[in-house]
Amino acid sequence: MKFHVVASDGFARAGEMVLSHGVVHTPVFMPVGTQATVKTLSPQELLEAKAEIILSNAYHLYLRPGIDLIRAAGGIHRFMGWEKPVLTDSGGFQVFSLAKLRKITDEGARFQSHIDGSYHFLTPERVMEIESAIGADIVMAFDQCVAADASYAEVFDALKRTTLWAKRSKEAFEKVGQSYQTLFGIVQGGIFEDLRRLSVEEIVGVGFEGYAIGGLSVGETKQDMYRMLNVLNSVLPFDKPRYLMGVGVPEDILYGIELGVDMFDCVFPTRAARNALVFTHDGRLNLRNKALEYDFRPIDEECDCYACKNFTRAYIRHLHRSGEILGLRLASIHNVTFLIRLAQRAREAILEGNFAEFKRTFLSRYQQGAFLHMMEGEVSSGK
């Protein structure tokens, strides 16, 4: 992997990341295809949305369909019909949030599958074997995530274990990783400033090609998240890509970019779309609102996605109320496109030296519109 910062505007960065399956221009939003598919969307639709990289998850793919099948298919790109870059998460967060009866020690994590109840034991070495077989361009070191309300002692213990696992992940990756793959380390530390600084010192000391920020967007306040990003911006290496894990709403993406973040991912845009919630320049919009019954405008008049160019709010509302799959697909196409384009427009603003004004203008309209949509929803529902 080659990465360089093309331009800066304040702390915001525009960069280029050259990977074996293509060039990624940062800041970038990465749609999430947990099970080797971005829910309801085809690879062609992702290309039309201008996606440059997508994310999948080693934990889920290891459990189903299994790495032997993916290896036999020729790797994740051939398996899912996606020729551009892929990033795989290591599964640390999933072990924390999904697995039953998990037991974590310095050796690894023993857990019960959320699919069939079978028992598994993941170590950093095993995770590197799994990610090598999957064959993504960027792979993540194994880490331990903790809850937002974890105590200082709990966060410290997870931090030290994450450092231990980072060292073992790197050693294993150097043995089993494929030549075109790149390994990122993950910084932990919760919402404790001194622990975040310590984690950066230790993980950067191990040495990785990029650094992910874990343990945020797990229930802490936005103020705490932004505070931690401000701390991390001052200590993470300037010449390496920075990836904020699990963040995918417009306001958080823009604040993250302002504080030096390059990469974002989140399941929320497609999950929200399947529940009729879409992003617009005027805030979030619930497509089930009765106020939209005769609204023949597109979801967003400034969006050129397939859904907005061809269908109306009234029609997509009808699809959602009728349980039609097309409604879920159109809303998903829109939300994914909206966030990809938002990151691309932020990049353009950085290159032009006016990111602060772009962020201010976007959020002023977005937040004011969100309030108006909320009021319209209350009126239409009789509240």
Image: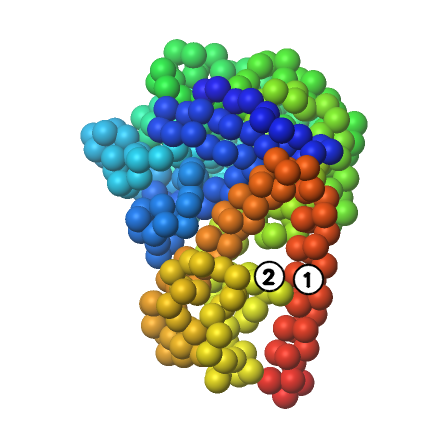
Quadrant including the C terminus:
bottom right
Q: Locate residue 266, reporting x and y percent.
A: 52, 47
Residue 304 appears in the figure: yes
**Label located before the other in sequence (1 or 2):** 2
> Residue visible at 37% across and 24% down?
20
Q: Residue at coordinates 51% horizontally, 66% vertically from top-left? A: 301
Which of the pair 207/22 is nearer the observer? 22
Residue 256, can we see it?
A: no
Residue 381 placement, left or right of 258:
left
Tell me where residue 93 appears, x and y as whole percent: 53, 39
Vertical position of residue 303 compared to residue 36: above or below: below
Q: Which residue is mark 2?
A: 281
Q: Amino acid at mark 2?
A: His
Residue 92 is tagged as: none
Q: Is residue 323 left or right of residue 273?
A: left
Q: Residues within 10 Å of mark 1 (few under 14, many from 20)?
A: some
Quadrant of the rendering where the N terminus is positioned = top left
- Vertical position of residue 308 compared to residue 87: above or below: below
Q: Position of residue 19 (x, y in %)?
A: 41, 25
Q: Answer few, some or many: residues within 10 Å of disc 2's Cα (few below 14, many 20 plus, some between 14 and 19).
A: many
Distance from disc 1 to disc 2, alpha carbons, whole Å, reads 7 Å
Which numbered tag is attached to residue 365?
1
